[in-house]
Image (cartoon, rainbow, N blue to C red):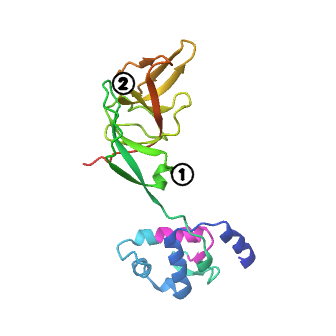
Amino acid sequence: MQISSLSVIIASMVLHPLQEKLLNLANREDLGKLSLRDIGVRVGIGRNKPQLVKYHLEQLRNRGLIRMDKMRKVLEPTNPGWAKSALRLPQPRMYKIPIYGMAMCGPEGIAAEQNLQGYLTVSNALLRRKPSDSFFAVQARGYSMNRANVAGKNIEEGDYLVVDSELTDPDPNKVVVAIIDNSAVVKRFVEDTKNEQIALVSDSTQHFPPIYLHPEDDFFINGTVVQVIKQPKLE
């Protein structure tokens, strides 16, 4: 492969940090003489992850950055010395989102007092959107939204819901946190203009009747749910 064409590929390429370490190592040593476990030690992940080493070497081979023989032995990098200029994958950043109690996913309400109860520490890779100071979190209580789909995830008791408090004028059928009679509920927002009413609807495997409101009633939308952080299932 010519260096000029390789440079074009590199310019559009983003590398995993471990792949960059492997390429730097390939520039210094003959990887064909090392076992996968030895390579793991040299790049700092130890001897117990040979399959991880193998996977990333194959990724480099698939990108045309190293050559390997039929026995999967590394022969050489295709362009020695290039790795220092390689682009890296953006490293995950951690964000702290304030937690303001619980919101009901059931028939009864819970007081919607804005008492800070701690912070939800979450990676931006899980948020899948640019974090904002307008974000807050509530913990779901109940099962009336266990069929709801927010970013591909349902809402079960114990899950944390990330809410954007700037989205108080929700699009139709969005999942919202609504404050009614000083109680916070999580429901799907349905604006029924034909009948001059608003329905807050449950998405559940159980039957929960909607909450029907008049547009002039004393309620407000505290924000729209933009992500669900699932509670881990501990065996």
- Which is nearer the eye, 101 or 203? 101
Residue 224: percent from left, percent from top: 48, 36
Residue with the mark numbered 1: 130
For residue 88, what is the image quadrant? Answer: bottom right
At which x and y percent is residue 32? Answer: 50, 83
At mark 2, the secondary structure is loop
Left or right: where does residue 4 sit relative to residue 145?
right
How crowded pointer 1 is (Cα within 10 Å; few <14, some 14-19, many 20+) is rated as few
Task: Let me know if residue 59 is in the magenta part.
Answer: yes
Secondary structure of residue under mark 1: loop
Disc 2 residue type? Asp
- Is residue 199 among what the camera can see? yes
Residue at (47%, 36%) from the top-left corner? 223
Residue under numbered circle 2 = 181
Question: Which span of residues is magenta-colored?
Answer: 54-69
Name the residue at 38% across, 18% down. Answer: 209
